[in-house]
């Protein structure tokens, strides 16, 4: 059963209804179970006051009650001449509807299992060959579409799975556990390309392009240029109006998916006199004359194509401006907002990479023996493994917290920056440590562990460098405290 068949209407966190089966709701930070801030403050203040009174006055006394489930502090409080008991439990109430960040809907868990099988069975046997050849196997791309993994949030009406944003992050994480190159292909296509069409395109554009992107046409996001990296709005690509067409001239650099893609979202400036407020997003197809000038030879994620693209008098129909006339000159807003979401995708990729390296190396430490026992049982090694496990878990919580906040319509820019920044650090540490844990074997290409380390380096660079993430986080802190 492929994930494409898991479709339905998304309402709140009730996503992807399986035919003849009801979906379970996730209550993670769900508005229906939140409390009014004043009520929360009143309860907190009351608890503090009662505790202080019970410990410091003659009005109350401490009673320590214990059973097999909990220890309870009970304060006796005078209220209108009557005494009443106020229990303080050291364990959360069993009726609480609040769940941990490890709580996923049934459909999200089914997706995780489905993607894991695909990654292990289809991607796994091809990883080393794709890395050595620096080429994505066409069968892998075909499989991603057949499994419904290239239209995860796309509506059923447009041929997609109509699932949650968290589902997309789950897919990205699971693919990265096996091959981060395949993961980033899925990530860019879903969190950047598809999302721009879903959020900003006209109804006619959505009806035309989303079914193609869900079926078999790979998408590419074209923003970066030789002189426009972290300073994305310094881009030099120009678009000039010629009747019913726009003529694009310029070049793009470091463009993911560009060799295999057929649909490109290209950011160009239609009025340089307005600066970044002239930036506009165009839908461009490969057959309009896009030239792939150079395919980069990279340290890592080698199977993922990264190319320089040239645009020499490329004619693009006026109707191909994302969002139509109302979004002419609004490309900078699209880019800012979409990259915030994309950063959660990269965090998911780095999280999966870290877990993949960990899963490959740790079992080996309990198989290889030195001095009469497994090397993983030596305290020095055991503590290193435990430390990395903690950091991977922290990265996971940051990532899925950002994903859920995005789903709920809450502010998530700072959380996305934190997740990407920290997950990229953890990915480098986990993969580097994994090589050392496996010793000489880990240093060889045969095990694939060293590939995770090579792939991890890009996490601190694309979709906003680590310094850009820290700058974003710092601005939020300054706003809060200054």
Image (cartoon, helix red, strand yellow):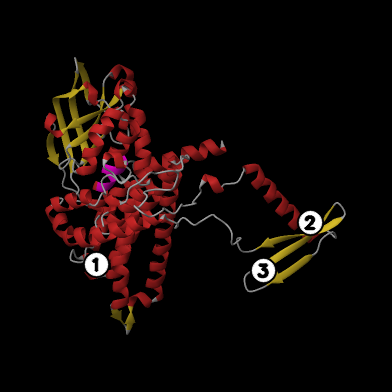
The residue carrying mark 1 is 442
Callout 2 crowding tier (Cα within 10 Å): few <14, some 14–19, many ≥20: some
Q: How far apart are marks 2 and 1 (CA)?
A: 61 Å
- What segment is highlighted magenta in the picture? 186-192
Q: In the rendered structure, does residue 215 fall within the stretch colored magenta?
A: no
Asked whether the residues under the numbered discs 2 and 1 touch, taking CB atoms below 8 Å apart as contact, a structural biologist would say no
Secondary structure at badge 2 equals: helix
Front residue of 84/267: it is 84
Task: Count neighbours of disc 1 (C-alpha within 10 A) and say few if under 14, some if 14 to 19, many if 20 or more.
Answer: many
- Marks 3 and 1, how far apart at CA: 49 Å
Q: Residue at x 30, y 65 (%)?
A: 434
Q: Is the magenta stretch mostly helix, strand or loop?
A: helix
233, above or below 73, in the image: above
Labels 2 and 1: the sequence-earlier one: 2
Residue 380 percent location from the top left of the image = 39, 72
- Give residue 53's mark: 2
Q: What is the C-alpha distance between the residues marked 3 and 2?
A: 19 Å
Disc 3: which residue: 71
Q: What element carries label 3?
A: strand
């Amino acid at each position: 059963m492929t994930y494409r068949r898991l479709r339905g209407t998304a309402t709140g966190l009730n996503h992807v209804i399986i035919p003849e089966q009801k979906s379970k709701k996730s209550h993670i930070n769900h508005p229906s179970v939140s409390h009014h801030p004043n009520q929360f403050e009143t309860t907190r203040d009351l608890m503090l006051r009662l505790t202080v009174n019970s410990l410091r006055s003659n009005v109350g006394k401490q009673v320590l009650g214990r059973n097999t489930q909990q220890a309870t502090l009970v304060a006796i409080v005078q209220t209108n001449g009557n005494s009443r008991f106020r229990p303080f439990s050291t364990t959360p109430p069993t009726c609480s509807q609040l769940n941990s960040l490890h709580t996923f809907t049934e459909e999200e868990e089914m997706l995780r299992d489905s993607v894991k099988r695909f990654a292990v069975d289809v991607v796994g046997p091809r990883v080393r060959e794709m890395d050595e050849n620096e080429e994505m196997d066409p069968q892998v791309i075909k499989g991603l579409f057949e499994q419904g993994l290239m239209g995860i949030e796309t509506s059923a009406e447009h041929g997609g799975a109509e699932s949650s944003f968290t589902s997309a992050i789950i897919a990205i994480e699971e693919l990265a556990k096996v091959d981060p190159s395949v993961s980033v292909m899925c990530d860019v296509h879903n969190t950047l390309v598809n999302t721009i069409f879903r959020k900003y395109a006209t109804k006619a554009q959505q009806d035309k392009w989303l079914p193609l992107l869900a079926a078999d046409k790979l998408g590419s996001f074209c923003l970066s240029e030789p002189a426009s990296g972290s300073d994305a709005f310094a881009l030099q690509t120009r678009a000039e109006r010629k009747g019913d067409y726009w003529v694009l001239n310029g070049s793009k650099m470091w463009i993911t998916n560009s060799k295999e893609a057929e649909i490109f979202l290209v950011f160009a400036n239609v009025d340089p006199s307005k600066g970044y407020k002239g930036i506009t997003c165009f839908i461009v197809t490969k057959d309009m004359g896009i030239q792939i000038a150079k395919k980069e030879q990279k340290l890592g994620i080698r199977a993922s194509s990264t190319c320089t693209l040239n645009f020499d008098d490329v004619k693009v129909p006026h109707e191909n401006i994302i969002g139509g006339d109302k979004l002419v000159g609004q490309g900078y807003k699209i880019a800012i907002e979409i990259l915030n979401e994309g950063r959660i995708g990269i965090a998911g990729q780095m999280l999966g990479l870290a877990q993949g390296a960990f899963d490959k190396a740790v079992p080996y430490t309990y198989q290889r023996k030195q001095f009469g026992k497994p090397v993983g049982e030596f305290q020095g090694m055991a503590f290193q493994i435990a430390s990395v496990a903690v950091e991977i878990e922290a990265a996971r919580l940051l990532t899925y917290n950002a994903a859920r906040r995005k789903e709920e319509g809450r502010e998530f820019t700072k959380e996305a920056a934190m997740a990407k920044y920290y997950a990229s650090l953890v990915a480098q540490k986990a993969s580097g440590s994994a090589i050392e844990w496996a010793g000489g074997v880990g240093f060889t290409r045969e095990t694939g562990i060293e590939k995770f380390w090579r792939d991890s380096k890009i996490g601190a660079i694309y979709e906003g460098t680590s310094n850009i993430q820290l700058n974003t986080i710092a601005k939020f802190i300054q706003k809060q405290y200054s």
